[in-house]
Image (spheres, grey):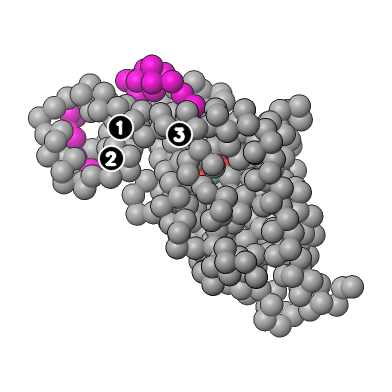
Amino acid sequence: MNKQKKQQDEKPRVFSGVQPTGILHIGNYIGALKVWVENQDLYDNIFCIVDLHAITIPEAINPKDLKQQVREVAAMYLACGIDPKKSTIFVQSEVPSHSELAWILNCVTPISWLEKMTQYKSKSGKQKTVNAGLLNYPVLMAADILLYETDIVPVGEDQKQHVELSRDIARRFNSLFGTTLKIPKSMIRKSGARIMGLDNPLQKMSKSAAIKKNDHAIMLTDSPEIIRKKISKAVTDANGEISFRKASPGVKNLLTIHETFSGKPTLEIEEYFKGKGYGFLKKEVAEVVINEIRPIQEKYFQILNDKPYLEKVLEQGKSRALGLSNIVLRNVKNQIGLS
Ligand code: AQP
């Protein structure tokens, strides 16, 4: 056993992923990627690009673009600081155990559990036809997590309910067929777990909304000029109050973005902005965001153009993911009586 593999196997395991449904925004970065990178040395990390999840709203997918979107997410993982020596990066659809375990888990998951999911209710409400894949999305997510004997799942607030459901599905499988699946826990950051839309601070910042509305989100590939412009248009209020507790949702969102990017304590931030206007707040928020994402953008475009490197990273990740996931899938099939 080589040294790197031994070290990985001794650490608690983390699993998380992002859908390749478009360019990532600062909500994805703060709620997920930044947390992954900050904790990378503590865990054996498995980070997936969940392309099977991306097709749950097929109307939003252009088949000609999907493979490129997968590569863009992989390049963004690496540019944000995910190190392939410490973390496994792979594409979900290249590891068939995900679909296979998802089917088995579908057979032990009551439909009523799925119909209660907040994301299902909100996304299905926007569709003319609601496909079964959208309802079963959290079962596939449970399969993703449970296949790797995951201990911890770092996610943004919006995915917490799905991790809870994965725990319930694992418990139900274990009670029906004997203890087989490890029960995971979610890891959610205290501040910044739910970054809101700049145009509507009552709506979560999301990739799909960003495609429809230009000023909704800061994308990780936006130029400094665009970031300044989008933030200058962010919804605030007429109160003029710059305080984490008393501010309106739009101002609080800007303060939270400042806090998560600057890493400064809330009291220090409030003191700094005391007596200043929203125009000043917006300028400062834009600068902390630009400072942090500029080097990420430089690396991103460099990695995206290095096709052999990206392919090598994904190939190595796939090989490890295939090995690990097959062990759990075999146990599950054995327990349930399948060959
Ligand atoms: N606004 C957000 N604030 C904090 N964290 C967020 N995440 C998403 N939006 C925010 C976290 O990013 C990770 C990857 O998300 P995903 O792409 O797998 O799915 P999502 O949660 O549905 O993200 P989007 O951006 O809203 O995509 P679309 O519009 O395609 O559905 C997750 O950990 C998520 O919690």
Callout 1: SS: helix
* Tag 1 residue: 288
Residue 339: x, y in percent? 89, 73
- The picture places residue 194, in percent across and down from the top left corner, at 42, 45
Residue wearing tag 2: 262
Q: Which residue is mark 3?
A: 296
Three-letter amino acid code at the position of disc 3: Ile
> Quick check: 40 left or right of 98?
left
Residue 149 location, quadrant? bottom right
Cα distance in 3D space between marks 1 and 2: 6 Å
Residue range of the region highlighted in magenta in the rendering? 221-244
- Residue farthest along the left direction in this orientation: 275
* Residue nearest the viewer, comparing 60 with 263: 263
The secondary structure type at the circle numbered 2 is helix
Residue nearer the viewer, 140 or 144? 144
Q: Is residue 117 above or below residue 75?
A: below
- Residue at mark 3 to residue at mark 2: CA–CA distance: 16 Å
Asked whether residue 243 is drawn in magenta, I would say: yes
Evaluate whether residue 137 shows in this view: no
Q: Are marks 1 and 2 in contact (CB under 8 Å)?
A: yes
